[in-house]
Amino acid sequence: MLAVAAMAAMVGCADLDSGSLLVSEADEVQMGAEFHSQLLAEMPAHTGDARVRQYVQAMGNRVVPHTHRPNLGYTFTVVQSDEVNAFAVMGGYVYVTTGLLKAATSGAEVAGVVAHELGHISARHGVKAMENYMLLNGLASLLGKKYYGDLVAGAIQTVTTLTFSKDQEREADDLGLQYALAAGYNAWGLVDFFEFLDQAYGGGGGGGAVGGLISDIGELFSTHPPTPERINTVSGALQAREITREHAGLDWDTAEFLTVKALLY
Ligand SMILES: [Zn+2]
């Protein structure tokens, strides 16, 4: 227990449940890098005006110091896709599609989504899904034996169909709200983006279930639109903190965002 507590403190998430710690942080980073290269082979990164990528990277770097794992090392990637989507991969990899940037109306909306994804990474949601998968499939013995490539290649198709639980989504919403606010973004942006998604993709039954591990927001809301409950939970948390849409010192980042958005094709 002492070792577990020490490790949790070391990565700065003593107040977050770390899971089984079957997958060490070094394992996580290495597997994340494998996922990242495989993902980029399937989903092209944005290659247009570099200011788009720089904007998202700067946004991510602004939020990271306020997360529970500020020292993990992060990579923020803009994916060229009209699908409205954002997702996180273990090891500090966060992705936002050009479709999401086109759909958003303020930087605060994008920041809310990015902060939500960083919440999944801080709470090790992807790692926990991987740990469960490995335990269920007897793969734990592969760890530490330099079989990461084989492990990931064999597992990626399965792992991408794993889902975050409703509780994990709620936790990521809560953490994302905290991180966005701490970074100085008006976190009502997350509510606005949920409401946009609800209107764009809503109408189904839904209920807060989630999409695949690597296709978080888009899959989530195309098949399971955000429930009034989830929107109300985030709104209520902001109201409880007496955060208003006009809150002094909190940034909507609209002007710079619209300039960047105009660079998209
Ligand atoms: Zn999520």
Image: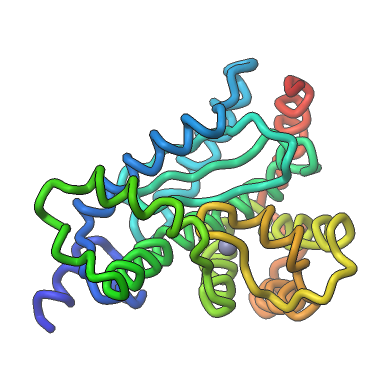
* 260 to 86, vertically: above or below: above
Residue at 29%, 67% (x, y): give it.
134
Q: Residue furthest bottom?
A: 1
On the picture, is 250 further left or further right than 183? right
- Percent coordinates x, y for residue 98 in the rendering: 69, 33
Residue 71 visible somewhere in the drawing: no
Residue lying farthest to the top in this orientation: 49
Image coordinates for residue 237, horizontal then vertical, percent: 66, 76
Can you tell me which quadrant of the image ligand 1 is in?
A: bottom right
Q: Can residue 256 be seen?
A: yes
Is the image coloured rainbow, by chain, by secondary structure, or in one colour?
A: rainbow
Side of 154 relative to 261 (left or right): left
Residue at (35%, 69%) from the top-left corner? 133
Image quarter where the N terminus lies is bottom left
Measured as percent of width and height from the top left, residue 48 is found at: 64, 16
Q: Quadrant of residue 194?
A: bottom right
**Residue at 51% in and 34% down:** 77
Instruction: Give the tally of numbered discs.
Output: 0
Which image quarter: residue 155? bottom left
- The answer to whether 29 appears left or right of 214 in the picture is left
The residue at the point 52 percent across, 69 percent down is 164
Front in this rendered view, residue 186 or 231: 231
The residue lying toward the viewer, choosing from 127 and 18, is 127
The one of 235 and 135 positioned closer to us in this rendering: 135
Quarter of the picture holding the C terminus: top right
Residue 206's spot in the image, x, y percent?
77, 74
* 233 shown above or below 100: below
Vertical arrangement, residue 246 with respect to residue 85, above or below: below
